[in-house]
Image (cartoon, helix red, strand yellow):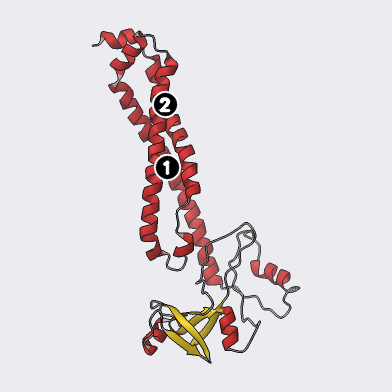
């Protein structure tokens, strides 16, 4: 078995990110699949390791690697068990995106860390780092193509619906114009309807998206689900502002068509 102590993740000031590893409270254990199976452990069991009593908080699913024979606990508990107070074996850090493509991040990190930790050695898991960099770039490229297409399609759809609405209400527009309603009031009716549709769409989209994320997210992001998957009400506020503006902008041309129609021509057709 491998005993591993984990300290809470640390983020730079003002750049909080959801944790990428388990956040284990003092006095708790996360037990690997094979360890739990061999010892018959389950969540809530009490375990004694080298005289220290700990509670099994979670039994992990099979991963097929060394984590299956690993017992993970809080760093302070591991140091206490091993009688090595204040000692650590490694610091794991996520590579930042601040380096230029031609830079060697390992050399830069070694030069910066050497004055602080002279005995430390810096290693980079190049395969993982390269895979993550390619994955991030692929996601950026994908969203750079998909998002504009989705926005254009949504705007075109709203514009088509608005044009159909104007066409179906030709007679009503003609009657209102003949009764003395100005172009501004008629345009305000169509743009106001677009704003209401935008508000309803923003609320519905936020509630539906949040519900789907809360339902399916924990099964996809098993480690970070508790801290990463939660309602983001800032997005709701942004959508309540941007969605009506976008809907009104998409309906601007149909609203212009409605106000320039001659009521005499419209009513003469009926």
Q: Position of residue 147 (x, y in %)?
A: 45, 45
In the picture, the disc for residue 26 is none
Snapshot quadrant of residue 217: bottom left
Q: Residues within 10 Å of mark 1 (few under 14, many from 20)?
A: few
Q: Residues within 10 Å of mark 2 (few under 14, many from 20)?
A: many
Q: Is residue 262 visible?
A: no
Residue at image point 63% right, 87% down: 84
Q: Is residue 47 left or right of residue 11?
A: left
Q: Is residue 165 left or right of residue 246?
A: left
Secondary structure state at the residue bearing disc 2: helix
**Which residue is situated farthest in the right direction here?**
115
Position of the C terminus by quadrant: top left
Looking at the image, residue 148 lies above or below residue 160 = below
Q: Is residue 34 left or right of residue 266?
A: right
Secondary structure state at the residue bearing disc 1: helix
Residue at image point 31% right, 26% down: 164
Residue at image point 64% right, 58% down: 98
Q: Which residue is mark 1?
A: 149
Q: Position of residue 247 (x, y in %)?
A: 42, 33
Spatial CA distance of label 2 from label 1 is: 24 Å
**Which residue is situated farthest in the bottom direction here?**
50
Q: Position of residue 148 (x, y in %)?
A: 45, 42
In the picture, the disc for residue 191 is 2
């Amino acid at each position: 078995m491998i005993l591993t102590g984990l300290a809470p993740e640390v983020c730079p000031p003002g750049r909080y990110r959801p944790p990428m590893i388990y956040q284990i409270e003092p006095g708790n254990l996360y037990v690997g699949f094979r360890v739990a199976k061999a010892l018959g452990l389950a969540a809530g069991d009490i375990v004694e390791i080298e005289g220290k009593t700990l509670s099994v908080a979670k039994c992990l699913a099979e991963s097929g690697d060394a984590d299956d024979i690993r017992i993970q606990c809080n760093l302070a508990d591991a140091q206490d068990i091993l009688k090595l107070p204040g000692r650590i074996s490694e610091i794991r850090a996520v590579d930042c995106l601040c380096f230029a493509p031609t830079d060697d991040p390992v050399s830069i990190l070694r030069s910066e860390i050497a004055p602080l930790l002279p005995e430390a050695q810096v290693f980079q898991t190049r395969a993982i780092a390269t895979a993550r960099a390619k994955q991030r770039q692929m996601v950026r490229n994908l969203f750079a193509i998909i998002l504009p297409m989705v926005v254009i399609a949504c705007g075109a759809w709203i514009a088509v619906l608005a044009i159909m609405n104007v066409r179906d209400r030709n007679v009503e527009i003609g009657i209102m114009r003949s009764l003395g309603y100005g172009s501004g009031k008629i345009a305000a009716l169509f743009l106001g309807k677009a704003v209401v549709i935008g508000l309803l769409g923003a609320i519905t989209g936020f509630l539906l998206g949040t519900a789907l994320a809360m339902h399916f997210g924990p099964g996809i992001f098993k480690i970070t689900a508790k801290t990463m998957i939660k309602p983001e009400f800032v997005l709701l506020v942004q959508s309540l502002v941007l969605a009506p503006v976008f809907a009104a902008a998409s309906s601007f041309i149909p609203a212009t068509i409605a106000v320039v129609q001659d009521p005499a021509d419209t009513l003469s057709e009926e």
